[in-house]
Image: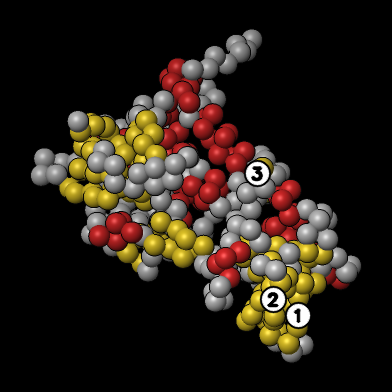
Amino acid sequence: MTLQTDCVIIGAGPCGLFQVFELGLLGIRAHVTDALPVPGGQCAELYPDKPIYDIPAWPVIGARELVDKLLEQIKPFSPDFHLGQQVTAVKALPEGGFYLRTSQNTEFHAKTVVIAGGVGAFQPVLLKLDGLERFTDRQVFYKVKDPAQHRGRHLVVLGGGDSALDWVLALADTAASMTLIHRSDAFRAQDASVARMRALAAAGKLRLLAGHVHAYRESADRLTGLAVKTVTEGEREVPAEHVLVFYGLSPKLGPIAEWGLNLNKHQITVDTEKFETSTPGIYAVGDINSYPGKKKLILSGFHEAALAAFAIKQRLNPGEKVALQYTTTSSLMHQRLGVHPPKTE
């Protein structure tokens, strides 16, 4: 049976979930697909316990907690989720709208499509040393599922971005020792995180090395250390019980690359009025899109989802003015949200 819907959202990460909310406020229900078996995207799959500091009104919130809050927020709109299945085909229909099919042969006729696929089908960039794969998820980790697993260990963190520094800061106090290795002394993380990391190094709580890992040491089928060629100190041996690798993600658009959309490297080109792609009726929000001044921030994706929702409402109701109504005062918004604000005298 082919499912009929006004909108299919491809991607159940934070931006895809917030897209459900923004569409729901405008009276549009959506179906949501994701290749992962649970909602949450990268937040759920790669760093569920990672602290996030730049969500408005939340001084700090865990990635998993953010996903849970978004799922709670969209409950009034009862979206249909189709998880563990990748959208493999998107085709424009002669009569308008789009045909979509997933890897599980779920089929849709949708009037509009929103691609909120993050970086696409992502894979962590691996630390490539012959034989090291034997230690994956035993002593070499590409995501942190349980921070307690690393307590009391000699930890080595590889990378220079936000994920690497976030986990250095989160785990430094509970590790037996902490070493951060990055290819240079220039970091790609937020300035505040870099400053806190350098303060730990100055206090002797962190060993900071600029260089690259070229070999590992083992004994009795256990990883015992890493060999590092440093920029200024020559060859160094670093003891390691657990190695956390944050070299980033290798973006693989997968089937999206075959849908005829204008691409800028691995991202989908959109406008900044409607966040519509080169195919009218297909929109893209979040990390997967590209436009002048683009910033890969969750809060930017939330903004994009709001404007895309208004554009979709206009497309579904051509010729009608889409009124801006505030959730604080609009009785229609209250009805859709299922809330009853207290009366004021």
Q: Earlier in the sequence, mark 3 or mark 2?
A: 3
Q: Earlier in the sequence, mark 1 or mark 2?
A: 2
Relative to 106, say whether 78 is above or below.
above
Quadrant location of the C terminus?
top right
Identify the residue at image location x=78%, y=53%: 151
Q: Earlier in the sequence, mark 3 or mark 1?
A: 3
Q: Return the residue found at the far left.
A: 94
Q: Secondary structure at mark 2?
A: strand
In front of the other: 228 or 200:
228
Q: Secondary structure at mark 1?
A: strand
Q: Amino acid at mark 2?
A: Arg
Contact? badges 3 and 1 (CB < 8 Å): no
Residue 223 placement (x, y as % from top left): 69, 68
Residue identified by numbered label 1: 237
Alpha-carbon span between mark 3 and mark 2: 34 Å
Q: Amino acid at mark 1?
A: Glu
Contact? badges 1 and 2 (CB < 8 Å): yes
Contact? badges 3 and 2 (CB < 8 Å): no
- Which of discs 3 and 2 lies nearer the camera? The answer is 2
Residue identified by numbered label 3: 62
Residue 298 seen in this snapshot: no
| Apparent side of residue 311 relative to residue 142 in the rendered image (left or right) | left
Relative to 327, say whether 233 is above or below.
below
Residue 172 placement (x, y as % from top left): 79, 59
Residue identified by numbered label 2: 217
Alpha-carbon span between mark 1 and mark 2: 9 Å
Q: Amino acid at mark 3?
A: Gly
Classify residue 242 by image quadrant. bottom right
In front of the other: 215 or 75:
215
Alpha-carbon span between mark 3 and mark 1: 34 Å
Q: Secondary structure at mark 3?
A: strand
